[in-house]
Image: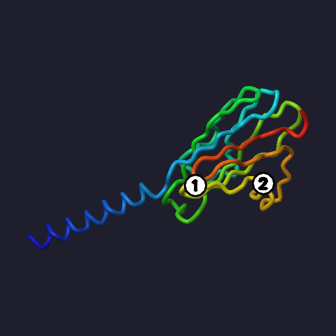
């Protein structure tokens, strides 16, 4: 009986330790989206191209007044086939002067961002706006300027 209790306790300790390690594996990141335009902009997380995210969720939208900033928290999902993968999603922007190409966002479990310009090139996208990346893990500012104003 005593041996069984020790075995159960040992297995429980391992399981709890594994959970704590998994829960602590991903860290929150922060994207500050800077609307560098004279227009009201909406940034929406698309359903297409969304994978391995606990945040933001599909369909989340944030609105920015002209020449202002909004924040979007990011958190990569652990487990469920996402370990070793990056969190990815696409941001659709409401440009009033033309239809914007979605902005691909890709980041690691510690909130380190892959430069969206590089990610767009990898995917074969030609962005029709300017994205300047400022900052480092886990906090970044994306200064987004329409090509036509």
Q: Which residue is drawn at 49% across and 57% down?
A: 78
SS category of the residue bearing label 1: loop
In percent of width and height, residue 71 lies at 62, 37
In percent of width and height, residue 46 lies at 69, 43
Q: Please name the residue that numbered disc 1 is placed on.
A: 52
User: Would you identify the image quadrant in which residue 142 lies?
Assistant: top right
Q: Residue at x 36, y 58 (%)?
A: 19
In percent of width and height, residue 125 lies at 83, 54
Front position among marks 1 and 2: 2
Which residue sits furthest right?
A: 148
Q: Is residue 137 above or below residue 67?
A: below
User: Would you identify the image quadrant in which residue 107 lies?
Assistant: bottom right
Q: Is residue 49 above or below residue 58?
A: below
50 and 76: which is toward the camera: 76
Question: Mark number for residue 4?
Answer: none
Q: Residue at x 75, y 31 (%)?
A: 41
In screen coordinates, is 25 left or right of 20? Answer: right
Q: Quadrant of the N terminus?
A: bottom left
SS category of the residue bearing label 2: helix
Which residue sits furthest left?
A: 1
Q: In which quarter of the image is the C terminus?
A: top right
In screen coordinates, is 23 left or right of 72? Answer: left
Q: Please name the residue that numbered disc 2 is placed on.
A: 117
């Amino acid at each position: 009986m005593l041996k069984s209790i020790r075995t159960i306790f040992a297995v429980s300790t391992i399981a709890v330790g594994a959970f704590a390690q998994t829960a602590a594996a991903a860290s929150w990141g922060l994207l500050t989206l800077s609307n560098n335009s004279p227009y009201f902009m909406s940034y929406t997380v698309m359903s297409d191209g969304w994978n391995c995210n606990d945040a933001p969720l599909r369909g989340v939208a944030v609105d920015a007044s002209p020449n202002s900033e909004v924040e979007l928290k990011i958190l990569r999902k652990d487990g469920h086939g996402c370990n070793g993968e990056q969190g990815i999603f696409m941001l659709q922007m409401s440009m009033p002067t033309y239809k914007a190409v979605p902005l691909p966002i890709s980041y690691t479990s510690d909130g380190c961002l892959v430069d969206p310009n590089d990610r767009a090139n990898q995917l074969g996208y030609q962005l029709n706006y300017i994205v300047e990346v400022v900052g480092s893990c886990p906090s970044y500012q994306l200064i987004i300027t329409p090509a036509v104003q």
